[in-house]
Image (cartoon, rainbow, N blue to C red):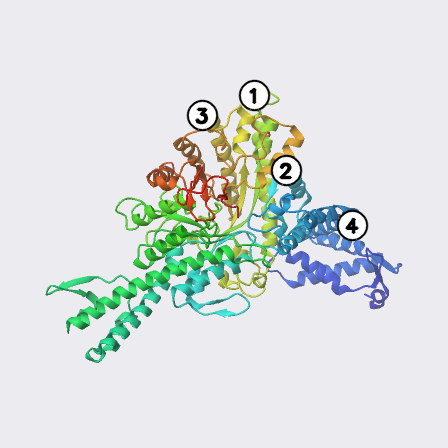
Amino acid sequence: MEKDFFDDLIVVKRSGQRVGFNDTKVAIAIKKGFDSVFEEYDEKLVNNVKEKVLKYIEKNYKDRKTIGVEDVQDIIEKQLQDLGHEEVYSSFKEYRERRAASREAFSVKQQHKFVKAIESLGLKSAREENSKRENANVDGDGPMGTMLHFGATVSKEFTKAYLMDAKYARAHDEGAIHIHDLDFWAMGTTTCNQIDLDKLFKSGFTTGHGYLRTPNDIMSYAALAAIAIQANQNDQHGGQSIPAFDFYLAPGVLKTFKKQFKQMLNDFLDLEGIKELINFKKLIDIVTNLTSIKIDYEEIDGKKHLSLFKEFSSKSDKVREIINLAYEKAFQKTDRITYQAMEAFIHNLNTMHSRAGAQVPFSSINFGTDTSEEGRMIIRNYLLAADEGLGHGETPIFPISIFKCKEGVSFLEGDPNYDLFKLSCRVSAKRLFPNFSFIDTSFNLPYYKEGDFKTEVGYMGCRTRVLANVADPNKQVTPGRGNLSFTTINLPRLGIKHGILNSDKADMEAFYEELGDLMDLCKNQLLQRFEHQCSKGKHNFKFLLGANVWLDSEKLEAGQKLKKVLKHGTLSIGFIGLAECLKALTGKHHGESEESQKLGLEIINFMRKRCDEYCEELKLNFSLLATPAEGLSGRFTAIDRSIYGKIKGITDRDYYTNSFHVPVYYKTSVAHKLETEGVYHSLTNAGHISYIELDGDTVNNVDAFENVVRLMRKYDIGYGAINHPVDRDPVCGYVGIIKDTCPRCGRKEGEGVEMEVINNFNC
């Protein structure tokens, strides 16, 4: 090969710029093709392809002085094919096509589109511009929120043009599917995570700007829990949850109690001047080694002794009295401090911001099954602090709290935490939260191992659930895992196209054929996004992976791709509008017709079976999601109405019904609604929720409220919530149902009484 030939060869770039030929760039382009397909390969393969490319150019361009950059890439493709590297060839070709589409999307003729979109963001309020309301806990009118929306607008178009296949972008734009959090695709972020606080508390952690030591009292535990949620929110586009809040924070209560007990003993013994009468060091050693704040009393010679300290307290009545008093005071003070810690935790999560100050983190906590005295103290004081509300009595939105019901632990009369279940019902009747999850359901209980809280189901506040793990059956746990991404199918459109609106009988064969095609489309789109997520490195997610929050992330080495850890997450295919779909197929939804219910279950079973097949085929956690309808349902409806017009019972409202829910406008009993929806919970393994809407004053009828929770368990509901009106008088702070007159201060209607409208947000 003559070196002088390449020294003189000029490459003409797309812009017309002329540069000298550089064989290193050829090698880099080929290497990127191999990198996109293989985690490991022989570097000699890259060099071999490069040499073939150079020989081809030398032979076919020896009489020319220039070569186009597209010609060089065509030659690379040809040599990849000729050498049998079909996978690399396909990847390289797709990459070029996406780059071409990207350049087209960002060409001059597309600029008007971007200008109009950005103009709406910059000049219109969130009340006027739908895109500013996509995320309920982002202030779309604030400067940082507006900045996020500017970036999101460009990022979405860039992703559709450059990072994904055109068929996925087209299906999204046409409203056949909805690719959630499309603006975060380019960043490779995952959706959500159930944060394992044990890992963070044991050795401390860093948020990237400083190291936080292992906490040593409950106030620090609660503060670091809030910081962990805030820090992780910056690495993900969805929500943050703590799956076992009571278990994780209980050690902080014990540490605080030991500190208080030691101090009380020292002060009281000093005050009485009898410290020298006992082996004080041994006394403190016993306190230091306590494993619980619960210490049993026993009676000796008619006198009450703390069993662990009887050798000291038996020496004199005074010593015994002081030890008993010190214990009681330490217990009481620890309880007060724990309440203050829970109060601070709630206030922190309703005021702290992530993402450049634009967003209150979407946070959730699960609790209810720790039966230790420390765990119970956490649960009780959290509920009491939530019951008290924020500074002016407002109902706190975050964290969305979820009480875990487990028979034998926290649900039946006589259970160790039954009193806390009763308290949770009372608080929820006033404050809307906590919601309720059920470990004993047919689909949650099989994963539960007694004594291992990691196997207890944990939900995100919005509904997301992660538990099974086909990628690693030995790690079927909740902590450290979450959803990777999800895409939703527009079921009502399929019903309209194949239903009885244009025919006497629904064409179910065509319906299932198209639904199957859309399922396959979503699977492949989720896989493409998954590969992009896996192409990132540990350094891209300094807290999620750098602090080992995600399961197995401590095993990642520098430069390794992320598939070995992200495989633990879920790839979810969702659906909304089952009710409208059934109306289009049969004339009735599943709440008003047993035949429609039968068909609805058949449809969702079909979808779940497909997801299970994908799991088996790819050994990845494909799952079926009962998609939250907030925001998305209105988008689908608007597109379908523009295509098919206003169809009664289907497109005549501004939204499609949430997932498998019985429509809110349909009047039915609580039991019938739960019975109808409950059978879908076992099928939607990526997440689900059923809501019951009550219109009375639940504070004055907590027994009825509790009965609704028990009905949820009866009908195999995995996760349920009870919504009801919450009014608040802004002057006296009364929270409850306010009709014409405030029950507390007597203020009349129209004199400034303020109503809070609180919904469960979407993560």
Callout 3 crowding tier (Cα within 10 Å): few <14, some 14–19, many ≥20? few
Amino acid identity at mark 3: Glu
Q: Nearer the viewer, residue 512 or 277?
A: 277
Relative to residue 85, is residue 412 depicted above or below?
A: above
Q: Residue furthest bottom?
A: 276
- Name the residue furthest left: 301
The residue under label 1 is 505
Q: Mark 2 packing: few (<14 Cα in 10 Å), some, or many (20+)?
A: many
Picture coordinates of residue 425, whole percent (x, y) = 36, 45
Q: CA distance from mark 1 to mark 2?
A: 25 Å
- Coordinates of residue 397 in the picture (x, y in percent): 48, 49
- Residue 198 % position (x, y): 42, 61
Q: Quadrant of residue 46?
A: bottom right
Q: Amino acid at mark 2?
A: Gly
| 74, above or below 314, in the image | above
What kind of element bears circle 3?
A: helix
Which of the two discs, 1 and 2, labels the residue nearer the N terminus?
2
* N-terminal label among 2 and 3: 2
- Depth order, front residue of 354/466: 354
Residue linked to disc 3: 594
Q: What label sits on residue 150 in the rendered view? A: none
- Residue at image position (66%, 57%) is 34
Q: Please give left or right for residue 525 compared with residue 694 in the image.
A: right
User: Which numbered disc, 4 or 2, marks the residue that appears first in the sequence?
Assistant: 4
Quadrant where the image shows the N terminus: bottom right
Name the residue carrying label 2.
Answer: 175
SS label for mark 1: loop
Residue 253: quadrant of the picture: bottom left
Q: Nearer the viewer, residue 354 or 342?
A: 342
Instruction: Using the numbered discs, state the Cα–Cα distance from disc 2 to disc 3 in whole angstroms.
Output: 30 Å
Residue at 49% in and 38% down: 609
**Is 651 left, or right, of 295 in this rendering?**
right
